[in-house]
Image (tube, rainbow, N blue to C red):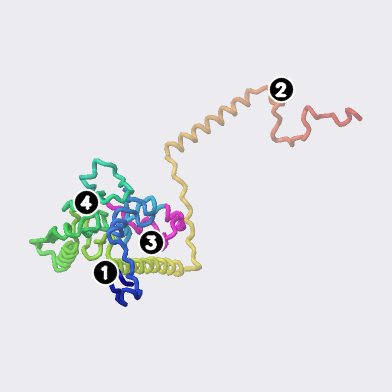
Amino acid sequence: MGNDGGSIPDRRDLVRTKAKAEQADKANQTRARWFFCALSKRPLQEPIVSCALGRLYNKDALLEFLLDRKQYGDGEAICGHIRSLKDVKQLKLTLNPTTASKSAAPAATDSPDERPQFVCPLTFKEMNGAQPFVYLSPCGCVFSLSGLKSLGSSSPKEGGASPSGSGDEGKKEKDGAATKDAQLELCPQCGAKYSKSEDIITLNPSPEEEERLRSVMERKRAAEPQKKGKKRKAGAAEGTEAPGKKKKASPTPAPGLNPNIAASSRAVVTSLAMEEAKRKAGMSEAVKSLYGDPSKPKNKETFMTMGTFTRYA
């Protein structure tokens, strides 16, 4: 260990210490969530949909998953909460002006200067994960959270009292409608109404925000079967009110004839009967014998078979 310039190793340099835990690259994780489909891991391409948890999917990949839930190995872990297309919303995204002239599909490379496809239509901030973005569940419009907050809340509609004094009930109804309208906001892009407390969904939220969104989703789904159950119970109660009674089909009345048409038809039948009687009255006896007398009993033999029994006897 000598003759090296006086370097003397310490014990702490020789004893092995616990290795540091590997940390995932946050930049790559952020880029994967905002530039690639959460299900297929392919670059995001329109049409793009999002679920109640704020995850981004390519619509074609989600359709493949719904048709065959074993199409992707981790599909159940990522989007097992999606039952049908009714559980997702197609997003209305604003293209980035700097990349609008290029191809709409992003390049699947790891170049650090890759530009995001979409921006906020209010602030033109790029949707790259540096700024939180949200979408409105009624319409699917996407904005940055700061841009949506910068807009002032829409003023409530003032319902003026009627000069004639319509009564307390009319005032209460107007007050209730005004309160309900005051709780709703208007989408700055399409004008659709939305609720600040329920209809704003964060895209790619933090784990804490995702848990909150999951609880809201589960609460809404828990309320759905109760409504269906009430309808089924009401239908069953109506069906058991009169189990032995069946509705008798009322006979359909015959359609009435026009008196003019009935009279004309009777006249035609009478005239035809008179013509037939005249024709038979002027008929010769020979011709009458061909037709036969309808009053006499008819023989089973005919002219072709009459007297043929003993022909070959």
Task: Give left or right: position of 128 versus 83.
Answer: left
Q: Which structural element holds mark 2?
A: helix
To which residue does mark 4 refer? 119
Mark 3: amino acid: Ile
Distance (Cα) linking label 1 and label 3: 60 Å
Q: Which structural element holds mark 4?
A: strand
Residue, far right:
313
Distance (Cα) linking label 2 and label 3: 101 Å
Query: Pointer 3: residues within 10 angstroms few (<14), some, or many (20+)?
Result: few
Distance (Cα) linking label 1 and label 4: 61 Å
Distance (Cα) linking label 4 and label 3: 26 Å
| Residue 87 is a magenta residue | yes
State the quadrant of the N terminus: bottom left
Task: Name the residue at 27% across, 54% down.
Answer: 140
Say if residue 47 shows up in the picture: no
To which residue does mark 2 refer? 286
State the quadrant of the C terminus: top right
Q: Do the residues bearing badges 1 and 3 touch, measured as CB atoms within 8 Å?
A: no
Mark 1: amino acid: Gly
To which residue does mark 1 refer? 5
Q: Which structural element holds mark 3?
A: helix
Identify the mark nearer the N-term, 1 or 4. Answer: 1
Task: Give left or right: position of 307 versus 93.
Answer: right
Residue, far front:
3
To which residue does mark 3 refer? 78
Task: Name the residue at 69% across, 28% down.
Answer: 291
